[in-house]
Amino acid sequence: MKLESKVIDTTTIISLKGDLDFKSINEIKENIYEIYAASEGNALMLDFESVETIDSAGIGLLVTIYRKVLGSGKDRFGLINPPKNIKQTLTSSGFTRIARIYPSEEEALKVG
């Protein structure tokens, strides 16, 4: 999995590309935590547009990141534009009851 990050106003956006699964979560977690620790904004958004698959380990990682972000005083955490199959998996797992999914980067930035 590949990551790219950027900061827009007070929101850190990390774009993910590839599979978020058991094989990739340890590396991804460390990279996201490094980016997150260096950010000074009040929100963290993960852009899921190029995520191809997610398994239960990937969902577990998202819950862990969600707790860490909100537990550290950040205002918001969410996902941007996941493909239909990923969104269905997130919905059926219950993840969408705790974290918001935005249809686009523009919509995620409007809320802040």
Image: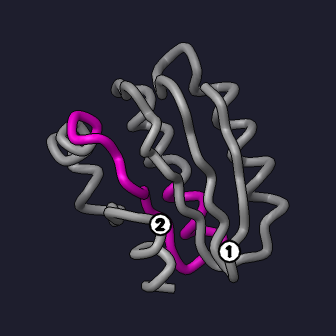
Badge 1 is on which residue? 8
Q: Secondary structure at mark 1?
A: strand
Q: Amino acid at mark 1?
A: Ile
Q: Which span is picked out in magenta?
A: 66-86
**Tally of numbered tags:** 2
Q: Amino acid at mark 2?
A: Glu
Q: Which dot marks residue 105? A: 2
The picture places residue 38, in percent across and down from the top left corner, at 84, 61
Mark 1 crowdedness (10 Å alpha carbons): few <14, some 14-19, many ≥20: few
Vertical arrangement, residue 21 with respect to residue 41, above or below: above
The picture places residue 94, in percent across and down from the top left corner, at 21, 49
Q: Are marks 1 and 2 in contact (CB under 8 Å)?
A: yes
| 12 is within the stretch colored magenta | no
| Residue 54 placement, left or right of 32 | left
N-terminal-most mark, 1 or 2? 1
Q: Nearer the viewer, residue 16 or 100?
A: 16
